[in-house]
């Protein structure tokens, strides 16, 4: 979605949300792809805890699940079964990727749906990951309530997950996307226009 409003735009300043006449054909394609990807990310939170698993596997014809009773219609956690130890895929490690996507989508659209979904994720984190003595921990199985926790809080939880959640609910003038770009660790870097001509193009 962000790429659609930058490289896929045919105007200098794209509206929030983008208007149909502001994006190229490729921009429309990228925008629609982004919208659908975020829907998929949000659906991976359809678990007992409301948290997404570390790895989600999507149904394909050769997965052999068509003959199983109660087979998942779209995605599943591989190796997960009632009464068995949870596989690595089933854990929630406090990752930021979904809330980062919701943050970008909200800033580009102004659609409250993205804030509502982020609020649900935040509430799920508070309910299932927070520990009484302070801090947050990895959930071993997103489909098990009450949650069992691993004594581990990844550093990206504070530097990325909580930062994107804060920015999602803060004013859009705080770190505006037309003036800053975020690196992969959620550090905002100012966008600059070079004032000196170089030999590089």
Image: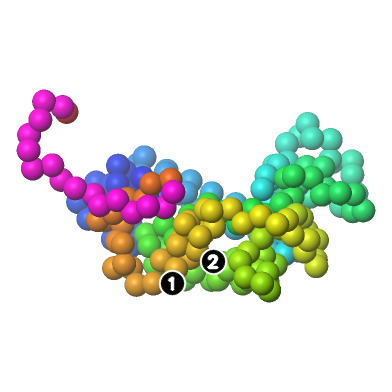
Observer able to see residue 110: yes
Question: Which numbered disc, 2 or 1, marks the residue that appears first in the sequence?
Answer: 2
Q: Which residues are magenta?
A: 185-200
Q: Is residue 62 in the magenta section?
A: no
In percent of the image, x 29 and y 61: which residue is there? 176
In the image, is 6 to the left or to the right of 186?
A: left
Residue that label 2 marks: 118
In the image, is 12 to the left or to the right of 195?
A: right
Q: Secondary structure at mark 1?
A: helix
In the image, is 99 to the left or to the right of 58?
A: left
Which SS type dominates the magenta stretch?
loop
Q: Give the image quarter of residue 79.
A: top right
Task: Please state the horizontal and vertical placement of residue 201, each as a whole percent of the image.
Answer: 16, 28
Q: Could you tell me if the residues under marks 2 and 1 are in contact, i.e. CB atoms within 8 Å?
A: yes
Report the number of discs: 2
Residue nearest the observer in this picture, 131 or 23: 131
Q: Give the image quarter of residue 24.
A: top left
Task: Please state the horizontal and vertical placement of residue 177, each as a whole percent of the image.
Answer: 31, 57
Residue nearest the observer in this picture, 15 or 38: 38
Distance (Cα) linking label 2 and label 1: 9 Å
Numbered label attached to residue 169 = 1
Q: Is residue 109 above or below residue 29?
A: below
Q: Label 2 crowding class (10 Å Cα cut-off): few <14, some 14-19, many 20+? A: many
Q: What colouring method underlies this structural image?
A: rainbow
Task: Please state the horizontal and vertical placement of residue 58, each as a whole percent of the image.
Answer: 69, 42
Numbered label attached to residue 185 = none
Observer able to see residue 11: no
């Amino acid at each position: 979605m962000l790429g659609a409003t930058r490289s896929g735009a045919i105007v200098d300043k794209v509206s929030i949300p983008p208007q149909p006449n502001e994006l190229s054909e490729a921009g429309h394609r990228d925008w629609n792809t982004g919208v659908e990807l975020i829907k998929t990310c949000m659906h991976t939170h359809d678990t007992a805890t409301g948290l997404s698993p570390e790895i989600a596997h999507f149904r394909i014809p050769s997965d052999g699940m068509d003959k199983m009773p109660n087979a998942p219609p779209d995605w599943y956690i591989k190796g997960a079964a009632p009464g068995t130890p949870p596989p690595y895929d089933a854990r929630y490690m406090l990752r930021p990727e979904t809330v980062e996507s919701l943050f970008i989508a909200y800033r580009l659209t102004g659609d409250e749906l993205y804030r509502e979904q982020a609020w649900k994720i935040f509430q799920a984190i508070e309910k299932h990951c927070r520990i009484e003595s302070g801090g947050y921990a990895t959930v071993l199985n997103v489909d098990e309530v009450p949650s069992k926790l691993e004594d581990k809080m990844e550093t990206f939880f504070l530097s990325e997950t909580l930062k994107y959640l804060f920015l999602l609910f803060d004013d859009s003038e705080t770190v505006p996307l037309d003036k800053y770009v975020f690196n992969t660790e959620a550090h905002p870097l100012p966008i600059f226009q070079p004032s000196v001509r170089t030999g590089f193009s």
